[in-house]
Image (cartoon, grey):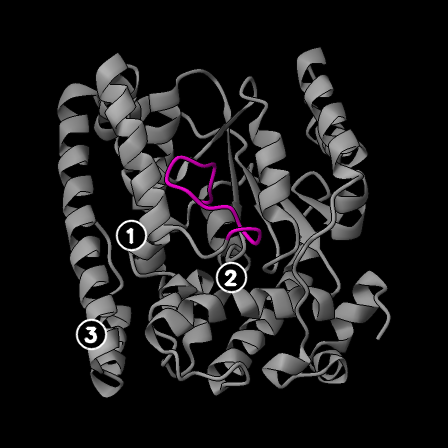
Amino acid sequence: MYVNRDTMKALGQSAAAHLNARRARTWTGFSAAWMGLRTMVRVGRRLDDRFFPEWREQPVREPVFIFANGRSGTTMLHRLLSWDEEHFASYKLYQSIFSAVSWQRLFEKIGHTPWVGSLGRKAVDAINETFFSGWEGIHELGIDKEEEDEALFVMALESPTVSLLNPFQENYQRMGWLDAERPERRRAFMDDYEAALKKHLFAVGGDKHFLNKNVFTAPRLKTFLERFPDARFVYLVRHPAEALPSWLNMFYEKWITHSPELPHDSPQARELAEMCFAYYRYVLAIRNELPSERFHLVRYEELVRDARPVVEGLYAWMGLPLSESYRAKLQAFSEKQRGYQSAHEYSLEQFGLSRDWVYEQIPEVYEAFGYER
């Protein structure tokens, strides 16, 4: 299995420089879990080659990648499309962590065994409460929920997600910038990544499109296109000054569990904001290179106003039919959606930033998408 050893070295150096008892517990626990899970995946993949060698013939046909800067509606759109199991195959979190046919089939069998399944349900609830609480009302997360593919990147240390555990990294916004890696590294990672997608599609069965969402996809676009030239990319855009404070708060809520002394307006928060700006600029530079059948723009404000016509437009763009049962689900969601209002409000000022500062960093983004300063 591929791992970015440069990132591993940088994380070790940073951890040593900022070590205290509280962080030591967090970082030691994560390191042990990371190594244990990698071992399980490695074992599962060996079992796959022995018991399910047909996975190698599984095609990855026209995968769909939903992406955006954080807090721009990717989770909402991804879960809406995931309801259409006739056309799409999405990851649940446990499936992306245990990326082997053998593990997925085993967990499914356990889940369908009556008395074992009941105990398993309790175990899943306990895991969700222990490891995935803290973002209630912000981003519903659970090992059995539809989720992005980021676990594959975390396993390889090709992800800025690790900064949730260690924000003390110089220039960490370049972490996970796959397009900037050496060609041999990109190929090595994508060999693992494509194998994981094949295994998942083989495990769920049927001729389906892999469906994914990820807020860290922007600096991986060229690499994805090299491997999947028929891929489709759905890009959501939201006013930067409205998306950014919510995104910063997501990271801050995790930072203070191990580094409570970090203020809202820390250098780490500003560096995270600068990473977001780099993502915006990169997408602007690439989107005009992509043909219209590969890139589709969705505006956040239209999605949250009424998701149904947005999804219908996506299906027309992809050339896919909507079943009557799926249309009914969309309609029911849209009716329920009209009464929703977020209970959370965040401001740039609490992170020591301002709307003027955001505009000054990326005026070209405001111009490209018609946002007011």
Could you say whether the residue bearing mark 1 is in a helix, strand or loop? helix
To which residue does mark 1 refer? 188
Task: State the image coordinates of residue 276 (x, y, percent, origin top left).
Answer: 58, 70
Report if the CB atoms under discs 1 and 2 are less than 8 Å apart: no
- The disc at residue 219 is 2
Task: State the image coordinates of residue 317 (x, y, percent, origin top left).
Answer: 73, 32
Q: Amino acid at mark 3?
A: Ala
Residue at the image point whose x is 61% and y is 65% from the top: 246
Q: Which residues are magenta?
A: 136-148
- The disc at residue 24 is 3
Could you say whether the residue bearing mark 3 is in a helix, strand or loop? helix
How busy is the neighbourhood of tag 2: few (under 14 within 10 Å), some, or many (20 plus)?
A: many
How busy is the neighbourhood of tag 1: few (under 14 within 10 Å), some, or many (20 plus)?
A: few
- Observer-side mark, 2 or 3, equals 3
- Observer-side mark, 1 or 2, equals 2
Above or below 1: residue 326: above
Q: Amino acid at mark 2?
A: Pro
